[in-house]
Each structure stands twice: as C-alpha cells, then as structure tokens.
C-alpha cells in the first residue's frame, strides 16, 4: 500500500477530528455542518438525529443517494496543517448500534446510558458516504507539498 494512503488512514483514525460536511439541498442551497465520523469499510459513517422534528438536509441527501463533500482537517500552523477532502454519494444505512457506538467513542470521554439512549434513538439515522474522489495534503512547516489525488474509488485510500 502507498505511504500516502497509509498516512491518510492514520490521519482519519485520529480521535476527535470532526468532519466538515457539505451538500446542496433539494432546493439547491448549500448546507454545511461539523459532524462526528468513523472511517471504516471503505466509507465515512455519520449518525444524524432529527432536530425539533425537522428533516435534516444531510439525511435527505443520503436518502436520495446525492453527492456530499467532506473535509477533515487540522490547522495549527506552522507544524500541523493537514487536509483530506472527499466527494461521493451518500446513502442511508440500517441501524447498526455497535458502529454508532464506535463513532461516538472517538469523541466522548466515556460511554454512558445517555449516549447509548441517544445512539438507539429512533429519530437518529446512520448514513455513510463513499469517497469516490478526493485529495489529501500536508503542509509541515507551511512548505508546499504535492497532494495525493484520486478520481475514482479504486485509486483512493479506501480501495482494498
């Protein structure tokens, strides 16, 4: 496996890094949110609750298998500036409580009954995206470095 791909996997496995997720709504307006995620089985996984009974534009995008854009980044210049940017189709997934727990355990200090109840809530849905296209880059010392780019899933960091 290419060193760049290994570095991307290591980066995405770092705890507590949020993902910036962007979509175009069904009306064509942009929506952007910071989300907790898990990189696993060739996909990025998210768990999104309905809030105030209003439908989430991210769940609507997943329900419609629409494209989403995701960026996971650090920005602590000059030594730690890293980005992985990906786009690809989203899809709703069946509820998978162990996977949802793995998402939350990356961010919360201790699993509790409150988190377990939240994870099992009928108003929250598991969804994923397949990173078909993307790029990854690091700027140690703010030096320009070549980016690792892929334009199909088979070339990307999640290919087998």
Image (cartoon, helix red, strand yellow):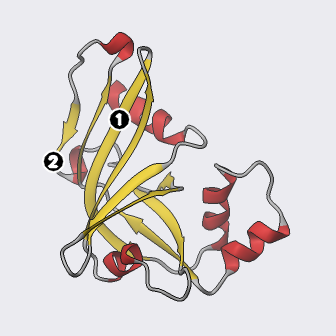
* SS for callout 1: strand
Q: Is residue 2 visible?
A: no
Q: Nearer the viewer, residue 42 or 58?
A: 58
Pointer 2 residue: 151
Q: Are dots 1 and 2 in contact, CB under 8 Å?
A: no
Q: Please state the horizontal and vertical placement of residue 104, each as a whole percent of the image.
A: 65, 58
Q: Please state the horizontal and vertical placement of residue 106, each as a whole percent of the image.
A: 64, 49
In the rendered image, which quarter is residue 148 located in? top left
* SS for callout 2: loop
**Marker disc for residue 83:** 1
Q: Residue at x 75, y 67 (%)?
A: 115
Label 1 or label 2, whichever comes before in sequence order: 1
Measured in 3D between alpha carbons, the distance from the residue under mark 1 to the one under mark 2, in whole angstroms, is 17 Å
Name, please, the residue furthest toward the right.
113
In the rendered image, which quarter is residue 120 located in? bottom right
Q: Is residue 124 visible?
A: yes
Numbered disc in front, either 1 or 2: 1
Q: Please state the horizontal and vertical placement of residue 155, each as a whole percent of the image.
A: 22, 44
Q: Residue at x 40, y 52 (%)?
A: 20
Locate residue 2 relative to residue 56 in the image: left or right. Answer: left
Q: Residue at x 47, y 86 (%)?
A: 54
Q: Please state the horizontal and vertical placement of residue 145, each as a whole percent of the image.
A: 24, 18
């Amino acid at each position: 496996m290419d060193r760049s791909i290994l570095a991307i996997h290591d980066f995405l496995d770092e705890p507590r890094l949020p993902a910036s997720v962007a979509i175009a709504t069904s009306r064509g307006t942009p929506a952007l949110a910071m989300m907790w995620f898990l990189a696993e089985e060739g996909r990025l996984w998210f768990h999104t609750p309905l809030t105030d009974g209003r439908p989430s534009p991210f769940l609507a995008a997943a329900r419609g298998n629409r494209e989403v854009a995701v960026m996971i980044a650090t920005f602590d210049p000059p030594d730690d500036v890293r980005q992985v940017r990906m786009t690809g189709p989203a899809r709703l997934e069946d509820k998978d409580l162990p996977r949802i727990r793995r998402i939350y355990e990356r961010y919360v200090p201790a699993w509790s009954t409150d988190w377990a109840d939240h994870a099992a809530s009928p108003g929250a849905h598991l969804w994923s995206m397949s990173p078909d296209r993307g790029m990854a880059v690091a700027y140690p010392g703010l030096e320009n470095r070549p980016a690792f780019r892929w334009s199909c899933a088979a070339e990307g960091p999640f290919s087998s």
